[in-house]
Amino acid sequence: MIIKSFELNKIDLKKNNIILFYGNNEGHKYQETKNLSKNFLNVLNYDQNEIIENSTLILETLYNESLFGEKKFIIIKRATDKMHKLIEEICAKNIGENVILINASNLEKKSKLRTFFEKSKTNLCIPFYPDNNQTLSKITSNYLSSRKIQMSQININLIVSKCNGDREKLFNELNKIENYSLNGKKLDSHSISKLINLSENHNVSELIDNCLAKNKKKTMTILNENNFVTEDCILITRIFLTKLKKILILSSEFKNNNNIDLTISSARPPIFWKDKEIVKQQILNWKPENIKKLIYKIHKIELLIKKNMQNSINLIRDFILEQLNSKTNN
Protein backbone atom coordinates (compact mmCIF):
# COMPACT_ATOMS: atom_id res chain seq x y z
CA MET A 1 0.00 0.00 0.00
CA ILE A 2 1.48 3.35 -1.09
CA ILE A 3 1.10 6.46 1.04
CA LYS A 4 2.72 9.88 0.69
CA SER A 5 5.44 11.05 3.08
CA PHE A 6 3.20 13.86 4.36
CA GLU A 7 0.55 11.29 5.36
CA LEU A 8 2.71 9.53 7.94
CA ASN A 9 0.63 10.93 10.80
CA LYS A 10 -2.18 8.64 9.60
CA ILE A 11 -0.16 5.46 10.24
CA ASP A 12 -1.57 3.08 12.85
CA LEU A 13 1.41 0.96 13.94
CA LYS A 14 -0.92 -1.66 15.42
CA LYS A 15 -2.36 -2.35 11.97
CA ASN A 16 0.57 -1.33 9.73
CA ASN A 17 3.64 -2.58 11.54
CA ILE A 18 5.89 -3.50 8.60
CA ILE A 19 6.90 -0.42 6.64
CA LEU A 20 9.20 0.35 3.70
CA PHE A 21 10.87 3.77 3.39
CA TYR A 22 12.71 4.25 0.09
CA GLY A 23 14.33 7.14 -1.75
CA ASN A 24 17.41 9.34 -1.47
CA ASN A 25 16.03 11.89 0.99
CA GLU A 26 17.90 10.46 3.98
CA GLY A 27 17.25 13.50 6.16
CA HIS A 28 13.47 13.23 5.77
CA LYS A 29 13.57 9.46 6.35
CA TYR A 30 15.65 9.94 9.49
CA GLN A 31 13.23 12.58 10.80
CA GLU A 32 10.18 10.39 10.23
CA THR A 33 11.92 7.32 11.67
CA LYS A 34 12.50 9.25 14.90
CA ASN A 35 8.83 10.29 14.99
CA LEU A 36 7.58 6.72 14.49
CA SER A 37 9.98 5.18 17.04
CA LYS A 38 9.71 7.84 19.76
CA ASN A 39 7.29 5.78 21.90
CA PHE A 40 9.45 2.64 21.79
CA LEU A 41 12.00 1.98 24.51
CA ASN A 42 13.57 -0.88 22.55
CA VAL A 43 14.85 0.48 19.20
CA LEU A 44 17.22 -1.86 17.35
CA ASN A 45 19.32 -1.03 14.27
CA TYR A 46 20.58 -3.61 11.78
CA ASP A 47 22.31 -3.48 8.42
CA GLN A 48 21.02 -5.72 5.64
CA ASN A 49 24.41 -7.46 5.41
CA GLU A 50 24.21 -8.51 9.08
CA ILE A 51 20.83 -10.14 8.48
CA ILE A 52 21.87 -11.84 5.23
CA GLU A 53 24.94 -13.31 6.96
CA ASN A 54 22.70 -14.61 9.76
CA SER A 55 19.19 -15.19 8.39
CA THR A 56 17.80 -16.22 11.79
CA LEU A 57 18.93 -12.97 13.45
CA ILE A 58 15.81 -10.95 12.66
CA LEU A 59 13.45 -13.79 13.62
CA GLU A 60 15.28 -14.38 16.91
CA THR A 61 15.11 -10.65 17.64
CA LEU A 62 11.37 -10.58 16.95
CA TYR A 63 10.38 -13.58 19.00
CA ASN A 64 12.85 -13.48 21.91
CA GLU A 65 11.22 -11.78 24.87
CA SER A 66 13.05 -8.67 26.11
CA LEU A 67 13.89 -8.45 29.81
CA PHE A 68 10.97 -6.13 30.59
CA GLY A 69 8.66 -7.33 27.82
CA GLU A 70 8.91 -4.10 25.80
CA LYS A 71 7.72 -4.07 22.20
CA LYS A 72 10.52 -3.64 19.66
CA PHE A 73 11.07 -1.14 16.86
CA ILE A 74 13.47 -2.78 14.41
CA ILE A 75 15.21 -0.71 11.71
CA ILE A 76 16.87 -2.49 8.77
CA LYS A 77 19.19 -0.15 6.86
CA ARG A 78 20.53 -0.33 3.29
CA ALA A 79 17.83 -2.79 2.22
CA THR A 80 17.72 -4.08 -1.36
CA ASP A 81 15.91 -6.80 -3.29
CA LYS A 82 18.17 -9.31 -1.52
CA MET A 83 15.78 -8.91 1.43
CA HIS A 84 12.68 -9.70 -0.63
CA LYS A 85 12.22 -13.40 0.24
CA LEU A 86 12.98 -12.91 3.93
CA ILE A 87 10.56 -9.97 4.19
CA GLU A 88 7.83 -12.08 2.55
CA GLU A 89 8.48 -14.77 5.14
CA ILE A 90 8.28 -12.28 8.01
CA CYS A 91 5.10 -10.69 6.65
CA ALA A 92 3.43 -14.10 6.65
CA LYS A 93 4.03 -14.36 10.40
CA ASN A 94 2.45 -12.56 13.34
CA ILE A 95 5.02 -10.16 14.78
CA GLY A 96 2.70 -8.96 17.53
CA GLU A 97 3.12 -5.33 18.60
CA ASN A 98 6.65 -5.16 17.22
CA VAL A 99 7.39 -2.86 14.27
CA ILE A 100 9.82 -3.36 11.39
CA LEU A 101 10.96 -0.35 9.38
CA ILE A 102 12.93 -1.16 6.23
CA ASN A 103 15.08 1.69 4.90
CA ALA A 104 16.20 1.49 1.27
CA SER A 105 17.77 3.97 -1.10
CA ASN A 106 16.16 4.63 -4.46
CA LEU A 107 14.25 1.55 -5.70
CA GLU A 108 13.29 1.20 -9.35
CA LYS A 109 9.69 0.41 -10.36
CA LYS A 110 10.65 -3.16 -11.19
CA SER A 111 12.16 -3.70 -7.72
CA LYS A 112 10.70 -6.86 -6.15
CA LEU A 113 10.86 -5.33 -2.68
CA ARG A 114 9.06 -2.16 -3.74
CA THR A 115 6.45 -4.08 -5.77
CA PHE A 116 5.71 -6.40 -2.86
CA PHE A 117 4.96 -3.48 -0.52
CA GLU A 118 3.01 -1.49 -3.11
CA LYS A 119 0.67 -4.43 -3.71
CA SER A 120 0.25 -5.27 -0.01
CA LYS A 121 -3.03 -4.31 1.70
CA THR A 122 -1.48 -3.90 5.15
CA ASN A 123 2.25 -3.21 4.74
CA LEU A 124 3.08 0.38 3.87
CA CYS A 125 5.38 1.76 1.18
CA ILE A 126 6.47 5.41 1.44
CA PRO A 127 8.69 7.11 -1.18
CA PHE A 128 10.90 10.02 -0.05
CA TYR A 129 11.75 12.45 -2.84
CA PRO A 130 14.43 15.18 -2.68
CA ASP A 131 13.45 18.49 -1.06
CA ASN A 132 13.45 21.73 -3.04
CA ASN A 133 14.75 25.02 -1.63
CA GLN A 134 11.23 26.26 -0.93
CA THR A 135 10.52 23.25 1.32
CA LEU A 136 13.87 23.59 3.10
CA SER A 137 13.31 27.32 3.59
CA LYS A 138 9.93 26.64 5.23
CA ILE A 139 11.46 23.96 7.48
CA THR A 140 14.20 26.41 8.49
CA SER A 141 11.74 29.20 9.28
CA ASN A 142 9.58 26.86 11.41
CA TYR A 143 12.63 25.49 13.23
CA LEU A 144 13.95 28.97 14.08
CA SER A 145 10.52 30.32 15.00
CA SER A 146 9.82 27.44 17.43
CA ARG A 147 13.10 28.26 19.20
CA LYS A 148 12.55 32.05 19.08
CA ILE A 149 15.67 32.62 16.99
CA GLN A 150 15.41 35.65 14.74
CA MET A 151 17.03 35.52 11.32
CA SER A 152 16.65 37.42 8.07
CA GLN A 153 15.42 35.69 4.92
CA ILE A 154 18.80 36.40 3.31
CA ASN A 155 20.57 34.32 5.99
CA ILE A 156 17.93 31.59 5.77
CA ASN A 157 18.60 31.42 2.03
CA LEU A 158 22.33 31.21 2.78
CA ILE A 159 21.83 28.18 5.04
CA VAL A 160 19.49 26.46 2.55
CA SER A 161 21.88 27.02 -0.35
CA LYS A 162 24.66 25.24 1.55
CA CYS A 163 22.55 22.11 2.00
CA ASN A 164 22.06 21.18 -1.68
CA GLY A 165 18.53 19.85 -1.12
CA ASP A 166 19.64 17.64 1.77
CA ARG A 167 17.27 17.86 4.77
CA GLU A 168 19.65 15.90 6.97
CA LYS A 169 22.46 18.35 6.36
CA LEU A 170 20.03 21.23 6.99
CA PHE A 171 19.19 19.93 10.48
CA ASN A 172 22.89 19.48 11.23
CA GLU A 173 23.49 23.14 10.38
CA LEU A 174 20.42 24.32 12.32
CA ASN A 175 21.61 22.42 15.40
CA LYS A 176 24.94 24.26 15.21
CA ILE A 177 23.15 27.59 14.94
CA GLU A 178 20.83 26.79 17.85
CA ASN A 179 23.75 25.82 20.11
CA TYR A 180 25.62 28.96 19.12
CA SER A 181 22.62 31.17 19.91
CA LEU A 182 22.20 29.64 23.39
CA ASN A 183 25.33 31.50 24.47
CA GLY A 184 23.73 34.81 23.54
CA LYS A 185 26.13 35.36 20.64
CA LYS A 186 25.08 37.54 17.73
CA LEU A 187 23.83 35.73 14.64
CA ASP A 188 24.96 37.78 11.67
CA SER A 189 25.91 36.70 8.14
CA HIS A 190 29.58 36.35 9.09
CA SER A 191 28.97 34.09 12.11
CA ILE A 192 26.40 31.97 10.23
CA SER A 193 28.74 31.51 7.27
CA LYS A 194 31.51 30.45 9.64
CA LEU A 195 29.23 28.02 11.49
CA ILE A 196 27.88 26.21 8.44
CA ASN A 197 31.37 25.66 7.07
CA LEU A 198 32.58 23.79 10.16
CA SER A 199 33.57 20.22 9.37
CA GLU A 200 34.10 18.82 12.88
CA ASN A 201 32.58 15.40 13.36
CA HIS A 202 33.56 13.57 16.53
CA ASN A 203 31.56 10.50 15.49
CA VAL A 204 33.79 10.10 12.44
CA SER A 205 36.95 10.07 14.57
CA GLU A 206 35.43 7.56 16.99
CA LEU A 207 34.26 5.40 14.08
CA ILE A 208 37.74 5.21 12.56
CA ASP A 209 39.47 4.62 15.90
CA ASN A 210 37.26 1.62 16.61
CA CYS A 211 37.57 0.28 13.08
CA LEU A 212 41.38 0.35 13.28
CA ALA A 213 41.21 -1.24 16.74
CA LYS A 214 39.02 -4.03 15.26
CA ASN A 215 36.25 -3.26 17.76
CA LYS A 216 33.55 -4.73 15.54
CA LYS A 217 30.59 -4.29 17.91
CA LYS A 218 31.37 -0.63 18.65
CA THR A 219 32.07 0.15 14.99
CA MET A 220 28.77 -1.40 13.89
CA THR A 221 26.91 0.53 16.60
CA ILE A 222 28.35 3.83 15.33
CA LEU A 223 27.55 2.94 11.72
CA ASN A 224 23.99 1.90 12.51
CA GLU A 225 23.10 4.73 14.88
CA ASN A 226 24.54 7.62 12.85
CA ASN A 227 23.25 8.90 9.54
CA PHE A 228 26.40 10.03 7.77
CA VAL A 229 25.79 12.22 4.73
CA THR A 230 27.61 12.27 1.40
CA GLU A 231 29.98 15.06 2.48
CA ASP A 232 31.10 12.96 5.46
CA CYS A 233 32.56 10.28 3.17
CA ILE A 234 35.49 12.42 2.01
CA LEU A 235 36.00 13.57 5.61
CA ILE A 236 36.15 9.92 6.71
CA THR A 237 38.86 9.08 4.15
CA ARG A 238 40.93 12.14 5.16
CA ILE A 239 40.75 11.33 8.89
CA PHE A 240 41.54 7.69 8.07
CA LEU A 241 44.74 8.83 6.33
CA THR A 242 45.77 11.15 9.15
CA LYS A 243 45.31 8.46 11.79
CA LEU A 244 47.01 5.77 9.70
CA LYS A 245 50.14 7.89 9.20
CA LYS A 246 50.44 8.24 12.98
CA ILE A 247 49.83 4.54 13.56
CA LEU A 248 52.41 3.67 10.87
CA ILE A 249 55.12 5.50 12.83
CA LEU A 250 54.12 3.81 16.10
CA SER A 251 53.75 0.36 14.50
CA SER A 252 57.21 0.65 12.94
CA GLU A 253 58.66 1.65 16.33
CA PHE A 254 56.94 -1.30 18.00
CA LYS A 255 58.35 -3.65 15.36
CA ASN A 256 61.85 -2.47 16.32
CA ASN A 257 61.55 -2.51 20.13
CA ASN A 258 58.82 -5.15 20.64
CA ASN A 259 57.65 -3.19 23.71
CA ILE A 260 54.14 -1.79 23.39
CA ASP A 261 54.25 0.29 26.60
CA LEU A 262 57.56 1.88 25.62
CA THR A 263 56.17 2.64 22.14
CA ILE A 264 53.12 4.37 23.63
CA SER A 265 55.04 6.33 26.30
CA SER A 266 57.71 7.57 23.87
CA ALA A 267 55.23 8.72 21.19
CA ARG A 268 55.63 12.31 19.98
CA PRO A 269 53.37 14.21 20.30
CA PRO A 270 52.32 12.40 23.50
CA ILE A 271 49.18 10.25 23.32
CA PHE A 272 46.37 11.53 25.55
CA TRP A 273 45.79 9.14 28.47
CA LYS A 274 42.22 8.21 27.51
CA ASP A 275 43.36 7.28 23.96
CA LYS A 276 46.26 5.05 25.00
CA GLU A 277 44.31 1.80 25.20
CA ILE A 278 42.66 2.11 21.79
CA VAL A 279 45.96 3.20 20.18
CA LYS A 280 47.59 0.14 21.74
CA GLN A 281 44.93 -2.07 20.11
CA GLN A 282 45.55 -0.38 16.75
CA ILE A 283 49.30 -0.96 16.93
CA LEU A 284 48.84 -4.62 17.84
CA ASN A 285 46.28 -5.13 15.07
CA TRP A 286 48.20 -3.51 12.21
CA LYS A 287 51.69 -4.36 10.95
CA PRO A 288 53.53 -1.54 9.08
CA GLU A 289 53.30 -3.29 5.70
CA ASN A 290 49.53 -3.71 6.08
CA ILE A 291 49.11 -0.06 7.07
CA LYS A 292 50.92 0.98 3.88
CA LYS A 293 48.57 -1.21 1.83
CA LEU A 294 45.55 0.35 3.56
CA ILE A 295 46.82 3.87 2.85
CA TYR A 296 46.98 2.93 -0.82
CA LYS A 297 43.43 1.51 -0.65
CA ILE A 298 42.10 4.70 0.94
CA HIS A 299 43.49 6.80 -1.90
CA LYS A 300 41.68 4.49 -4.34
CA ILE A 301 38.38 4.56 -2.42
CA GLU A 302 38.49 8.37 -2.18
CA LEU A 303 38.91 8.59 -5.95
CA LEU A 304 36.03 6.13 -6.42
CA ILE A 305 33.80 8.17 -4.08
CA LYS A 306 34.50 11.38 -6.00
CA LYS A 307 33.50 9.64 -9.24
CA ASN A 308 30.36 8.11 -7.72
CA MET A 309 29.06 10.53 -5.08
CA GLN A 310 25.51 9.11 -5.18
CA ASN A 311 26.80 5.78 -3.92
CA SER A 312 29.47 7.25 -1.61
CA ILE A 313 27.86 6.18 1.70
CA ASN A 314 27.59 2.55 0.57
CA LEU A 315 31.18 2.61 -0.71
CA ILE A 316 32.66 3.95 2.53
CA ARG A 317 30.49 1.67 4.66
CA ASP A 318 31.55 -1.45 2.74
CA PHE A 319 35.18 -0.30 2.95
CA ILE A 320 34.96 0.00 6.75
CA LEU A 321 33.31 -3.44 7.06
CA GLU A 322 36.07 -4.91 4.90
CA GLN A 323 38.75 -3.54 7.25
CA LEU A 324 36.95 -4.91 10.31
CA ASN A 325 37.06 -8.42 8.87
CA SER A 326 40.53 -8.32 7.31
CA LYS A 327 43.55 -10.10 8.82
CA THR A 328 46.25 -7.49 9.36
CA ASN A 329 48.51 -8.67 12.17
CA ASN A 330 50.06 -11.74 10.59
Image (cartoon, rainbow, N blue to C red):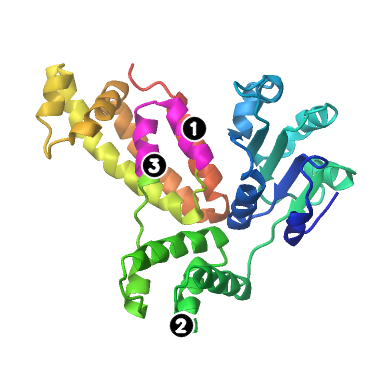
Say which mark, if any, is on residue 152.
2
For residue 94, side relative to residue 104 (left or right): right
Taking depth in this image into account, of 215 and 253 the one nearest to the observer is 215
Between marks 3 and 1 in the image, the one whose residue lies nearer the viewer:
1
Q: Amino acid at mark 1?
A: Met
Can residue 208 be seen here? The reply is yes
Dot 1 or dot 2: first in sequence order is 2
Q: Which residues are magenta?
A: 205-225
Crowding around mark 2 (Cα neighbors within 10 Å: few <14, some 14 to 19, many 20+) is: few
Q: Which residue is mark 3?
A: 298
Query: Does the segment drawn in magenta span residue 201?
Result: no
Q: Amino acid at mark 2?
A: Ser
Which structural element holds mark 1?
helix
- Determine the residue positioned at 76% across, 43% down: 13
- Determine the residue positioned at 48% across, 77% down: 156
Query: Does the segment drawn in magenta span residue 215?
Result: yes
Say which mark, if any, is on residue 220.
1
